[in-house]
Amino acid sequence: MKQFVFFIVTILSLNSLYSQDLRDPGTNNTTSFTTILSDYGPRNFTGQGTASVFHPGIDYNIVQPSYAYEIEGGTLTLFGSLNNDLAFIVVGNWKYQHILVGRTSDYHWELREDFDNEGPVIFIRSGVKGVNLTTNSIYISSSRTVTSIKDPETNQTLIGETFIPQGTSIFIPRPSGYNGYALGNHLHLQRNANSNLNPLEFVVHQDAAVANITVTPAFKRINNGTATPFTDGIIYGNPVIIEADVNSQTDKDFDNLAISTSKDNGVTFQNLNTWHYTGAQRIQANQVVRLNTVQAINNAVTQGVYPVLDLVSREFFKYRWNTQQLKAGETVISSSSVAYPDGQYIVRHIAEDVTHHQTTEDNTVTLDNFRPYIRKVEIRRNTANGDELYTGEWRWSGTALTLSQQSPRSATENDDIW
């Protein structure tokens, strides 16, 4: 009798590593969410000063006396920048920044910068000062050599712990202006080992079952240095400005935008450009353009990402589409030598959030780079060989068409015009 043993092999996709199962750091649960003040990606705030153009984390609206809680559980490995605005701790995979160096008024939380000359210590206490104040836990970095620590406020001696459990009130923000430091009174949460990852790939947040992203495209030409919209669905020029107003203010978890085009009614698409906020292809700070008004953004002709001033999760993307790009081996621009010949195209925008929900926006446009035009007009007196009254002519300079006009003589009411 033969016996068969069946093995069930489960293959985990990479996406499973990015499931949003970690607690919200402000509410300490997975069902309610703290307001996000600044999302992951490019930003543009009044008075931004030295703050990063590309924000590699999430800023949560956690202000004193509220705590932030350890979201995952991990070892306290580092205290950093404790003498300036960027004071932080690193616990496991996560950096918690703008932490208070000092204690709360109720003595329940305290970070001492250089306790017993051995480095920083965090005290977690309960009770009332002078009545029943009790030391519950003492947290130290994993590099500390002295682990037996006496709390000077309670005279209790405990062994310092390096592992901080999930849900521990490990962070309280430094108020703005505290000890002369300008920044603070919020939590900046960042993936410590890899800032190319958006924390919202791991942490629960408002996340609809579909992408809460709107994409509003526009097609523009450059007119005296200003991006000017086409109004009739016919586009032309070198380049054509493809502009996309992308709004993800509801979920604040935008990740990437791809623009592609199809000449065969959507059977195949050719990618024009993709902007990534995460991963190895993440956009760089020099691709971010900061302007003060939406009107100024609308007028701009530079390719890049334009975050709207003082708004979280609304950016404009501009791509300069070279519609007269030559095919390989071609040297002269003509309707048959370019990669994008005249005709009807579908231009597709796909916006995606960190949980891989997508919004797709298709626009059908007619490309007409090689439309016929009147090259030259002559007006003469009486006959084809008569005196020249007016000549208007378009001339190619090698880079652009220019209009040349001459009127050497005037006509009278008795002249025949040819």
Image (cartoon, rainbow, N blue to C red):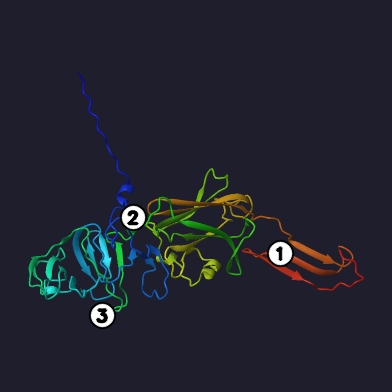
**Going by the picture, which residue comes out furthest to the top?**
1
Q: Which of marks 1 and 3 is in front?
A: 3
| SS under mark 3 | helix
| Residue bearing the label numbered 1 | 394
Query: Could you say which is closer to the camera, residue 43 or residue 397?
Result: 43
Measured in 3D between alpha carbons, the distance from the residue under mark 3 to the one under mark 2, in whole angstroms, is: 35 Å
Observer able to see residue 197? no
Please give left or right for residue 351 compared with residue 329 in the image. left
x%, y% of residue 36?
Answer: 36, 64
Which residue extends farthest right?
Answer: 414
Residue 162 is situated, as x and y percent measured from the top left of the image, at 15, 62
Check disc 3 and give the amino acid type: Asn
- Answer with the quarter of the image where residue 49 lies: bottom left
Figure quadrant of the C terminus = bottom right
Q: Is residue 264 above or below residue 118?
A: above
Q: Mark 2 points at which residue?
A: 201
Type of residue at label 1? Answer: Trp
The answer to whether residue 107 is left or right of residue 377 is left
